Image: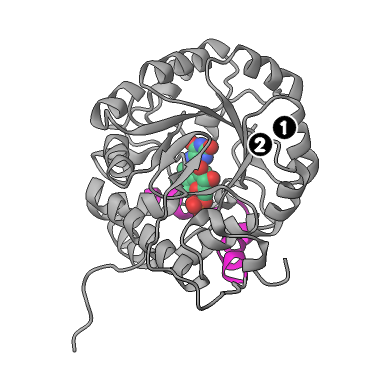
Amino acid sequence: MSASPEPINVTDYERLASELLADGPAGYFNGGAGDENTLRANAEAWSRVTLRPRVCVDVGDMSTAVTVLGEQLSMPILVAPTALQRMAHDDGEPAMAKAAQAAGTLMVCSTLASSSLAEIAAAAPGGRRWLQLYLCRDRSVSNALVDQAVEAGATAIVVTVDAPYAGLRERDPRSGFVVPDHIDMPGVTAALGRSAGLTVEEFFSMVDPTLTWAKLEAFIASAPLPVLVKGIQCGEDARLACDHGVSGIIVSNHGGRQLDNVAPTADVLGEVVEAVSGRVEVLVDGGIRRGSDVCGALALGASAVLVGRPALWGLTVGGAAGAERVLEILRRELEITLALLGVTSPTQLTRAHVAGA
Ligand SMILES: Cc1cc2nc3c(=O)[nH]c(=O)nc-3n(C[C@H](O)[C@H](O)[C@H](O)COP(=O)(O)O)c2cc1C
């Protein structure tokens, strides 16, 4: 029997994408900060979350559908904001938006997108989207992005707070990575006058490094949409985020791209969930590669997860169809894992479904 040439899991897509990408883009997408300890630890930590199945439960009628911050989705798996998707595939963010819509889930659009929010909305008019926002030194740039997001039908803003500066990602200077000439990042161009030819540090120079909880609270008070905060890594900050008016928290270490040697998100999720104590929904990302990882996260108290690189790998390999296929693989793995755990819906997962929690 010959091996199937079709990729059947996320890791297959990772390998195929790496074969297709040049060194610069591959290093930018796949790399992390410093020694990449957290990058590796993120995925390893989910594989160490031990599941506790129950048996002799009627699992004849399964659903992976959930409601996340009021959004009815086919599954608790969202597309994380990732920059420069046209570098993965010429069809870029519009293709990712089509994939998310076809998979029945939501895409978070990056401030560092290589398409405008209007182009993204036009590609997937029925799709759900949130805007990921870096609060810029020039607030008029952030405000313009928010206006465009409202116009494009976005229903929430995700403010990323773990990147006042770009992390020390060593693959980029080694490969000589700069934003390719043919790619425009409209948000960066609005802030800095251009995006092509910039290094990662250069395009991050648009981000306001003086953001405090008080400034965030002022932004939230004036925002036309609910605001989630992305990049929380401890219970103290989770409590402060709630005190300052966020509508949701995303536990994230930016996929190991910012501060190296921080704990994998699987290890801090429980602390954050406990600190938040049900005041807002808690989401998590970083290293989610399997439906079983999703179940672990939900059992530990997350209402949903986000995937960054897996969606990029799908996009790289097959454009919109590839990204959709990756999302569908994860949804199917989630469904089977739920059934084998003895539940018929993601909402039935509890701490009792993981060992030692
Ligand atoms: C290539 C790449 C670009 C990213 N760009 C952004 C970004 O513009 N804004 C942001 O908040 N997070 C960004 N992230 C972080 C992701 O939103 C997410 O936190 C991370 O990818 C999750 O880890 P995973 O890739 O292991 O799923 C980026 C991640 C990658 C891999």
Residue 38 covered by magenta stretch: yes
Quarter occupied by residue 83:
top left
Mark nearer the N terminus (2 vs 1): 1
| Residue 156 x/y as whole percent | 50, 27
Q: Quadrant of the N terminus?
A: bottom left
Pick the front one: 143 or 31: 143
Please determine whether, in this image, residue 15 is positioned above or below residue 261.
below
Q: Residue 328 placed where, x, y %?
A: 32, 56
Q: Are marks 2 and 1 in contact (CB under 8 Å)?
A: yes
Query: Tag 2, which secondary structure?
Result: loop
Label 2, residues with CA under 10 Å away: few <14, some 14-19, many ≥20: some
Above-or-below relation of 77 to 163:
below
Q: Which mark is residue 241?
A: 1
Q: Secondary structure at mark 1?
A: helix
For the question of whether residue 35 can be seen, the reply is no
Check disc 1 and give the amino acid type: Ala
Residue placed farthest to the bottom in the image?
A: 1
Residue at x 62% of width, y 35% of height: 248
Q: For this view, does 1 lie left or right of residue 170? A: left
Q: Is residue 4 above or below residue 288?
A: below
Residue range highlighted in magenta: 24-49
Place of residue 80 in the rendered image (x, y in percent of width and height, measured from the top left): 47, 43
- Residue sitting at 72 percent across and 47 percent down? 272
Residue that badge 2 annotates: 280
Residue 282 is labelled as none
The single residue placed furthest to the left in the displayed view is 1
Label 2 or label 1, whichever lies nearer to me, is 2
